[in-house]
Amino acid sequence: MTMYKMKAALLLFLALSVACTEAGKPSKPVTKVREKRIPRAEKRKIEKEKLDKYISMRKQGFDEVSNTKTAAELRAYRLRKKKMKGIIRKKPVSLSSVLFPGVSPEEYLEDDEIVMVADLVDSSKTQVPYEYYDLPVCKAPKMDEIKKSKFYRKNLGARLQGHELKPSPYKLRVKQSHGCQPLCVVSVKSSKLARLKKLVARSYTVQMSLDQLPVLMRSKELNYASRGYGVGFLAPPATSSGLKSDESYLYNHLKFTITYREAPSEFQGVRITGFDVHPVSIDHKIPENFSPTSTVDTCSGKKNVGNHPDSYLKIRTDKSGQFNVLYSYEVEWTESDLEWSDRWDVYLVGSPDDDIHVFAIVNSFFIVLFMTGAIGTILVRALRRDIAGYNEMQTLEEAQEDTGWKLVHGDVFRPPQYSLFLSVAVGTGAQLATAFFLTLMCSVLGWLNPMRKGAALTAIILLYVLSGTVAGYVSSRLSKFCDGKAWKKNSIYTAAGLPGLLAGMFSFLNIFLTFAGAATAVSFLTIIVLLLLWICVSTPLVLLGAFLGLRAKEIEVPTKINQIARVVPPQAIHLNPIVTMLYGGMLPFGAVCIELAFIMSALWLHQIYYVMGFLMAVLIILVITCAEVSIVLTYLRLCAEDHRWWWPSFWNCAGAGFYMWFYSVYFLTNQLDLVGFLPISVYMTYMSMISICFGILCGGVGTVASFWFNRIIYGSVKID
């Protein structure tokens, strides 16, 4: 023991010596470098100079879409607001970090083989996409001949959206440029020419990607860039080039331009910064016994094969009754100074500025502010006066009969008719709200990549399934309060109600998509996966939530329910349930209508939507708006001595779903140019499904908010 004490004393002495030695040393002053803030006037001056420079360069004819240094500077100025991240103090970031959080660049060595990925063939005139190899094109290379990568892994959302990523027939090697190279000859029967002409007439475009970059068609003269290239083109009705009016022509030669950046001091190899294509229609002279090594007079080794009216490839059969096509391509690798982090800038040129999203949120915020003022007026003035008056009358025993909303205190918590269906609807609304909130939270935190094909849809489906416990719990608690005895039926309806309805609509549409050969037609295996998710995951979670809800203590209310329901007096026209649904659903829809326009453009016009932070703010504003609208209309109904508030509180906010459906009809007639019965059916079916979900979500929020409001106000008065 003495030895241990001596060791402890020695260690303590050494520690004190070291501490004294360090204390005797002069401490280094800690300097904190703070960025010098630029005065506001100087900021405005700098912005004015940048704007003048931008306008001057655009007037001189400089474009914004090429990969030159000047074009990159113009893009950077135009997209400057999109490259700012933060709420209070914004910091500049790259668009790659916003669109692909956590994704690092990939380097390639010279002569490495790179796989060009073929995606869908789609059109803005129809919402019926096809797979690339449904076209009369060269056969796909075998999968064992290429390196399998993550680009070929399909998630559930990608399967439902029809994204079948396959290797294209075009072979590429890093920094290996070559001129026109024949690829294959395809013979198209006359029976399939009508379908090919139909694709050309409806402006179908082929989508490809390289290193996750979608292929671009650029025009420096028009300062225009668009994703994909057309299957072909139609001759204009009136032309001076000698082309036959409305004749169909096919693009059979592709000129690929790949830009890259090399920086040996920073990284090894090359980084791809651009992927462009220039389609050409040329009537190649096909030699007999063709092979990829055959010599073609109009192609072999030639560079800059261009479009000429006298050599366009017409889509028509020859003497043998077939349409023979020789496909060819050429590749040019061009070095560029463009940074890898800025390679996505060109894809967002022309998209709406973030200021519009801010204006949308400000618009929604003022709607919420208006409703909050109305709620404040009710709670602070009217209710306080009413409650004080009721309590004073009870104290002085002057009141012979109650008036106003207190008059229905014995019936306000009476269970409504069809309480089973109301419980199911409110529980489903809670499940939808939870799934959407968690999906947006994952996007805001960077856990979900909005640009990955099908990722958002996969997240919504999985989180909706995993949120089944919320639906079961809310539905069972409300059913228990309404004296519902059929708890098994309530749980089954909650688990199968909305999924069954959506599955029925989707299955009916899938029959027509299958007959049309669309890429979005879902396979039997995918349907089995969805069925297993529903039966093996969603339903047990709903039953678990129902069990927890039934075990929980019953919701207590401050008043007793009368045995006989009070007769409701005649109501004014503005309190008619249909009328309140019409003007009640207007405000929730108005809170999201501007942001909805961007979402609709992303869904149906193939634009990029990535501002999930704004969408999260809009969702929160929507929930607050629904709650406040429901509270105000419920208070007005109770003041008119109408205790039947349960279903009106749901439909008052669910009416926003009807407005969304009518807006989708407006969007169809004014923004889309759909051709044919099937494309319109696809659009209206999907928008009807979205509108139903939106209405149920809003209705569920409204019912819960009104129930909470009634418990508060009736718990604040003295009732015998």
Image: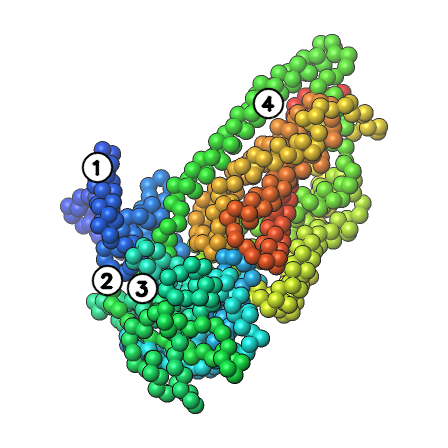
**Which is more toward the observer, 625 or 486?**
625
Q: Amino acid at mark 2?
A: Asp
In the drawing, what numbered circle is on residue 45? 1
Mark 1 vs mark 2, CA separation in Å: 29 Å
Q: Quadrant where the N terminus lies?
A: bottom left
Where does residue 650 sit, x and y in percent of width and height? 67, 38
Q: Amino acid at mark 3?
A: Thr
Residue, disc 3: 273
The secondary element bearing badge 4 is classed as helix
Callout 3 touching callout 2 (CB < 8 Å): no
Q: Is residue 673 above or below residue 660?
A: below
In the drawing, what numbered circle is on residue 378? 4
Mark 3 vs mark 4, CA separation in Å: 59 Å
Q: Quadrant of residue 276?
A: bottom left
Q: Quadrant of residue 678?
A: bottom right
Q: Work out whether residue 580 can be spotted.
A: yes
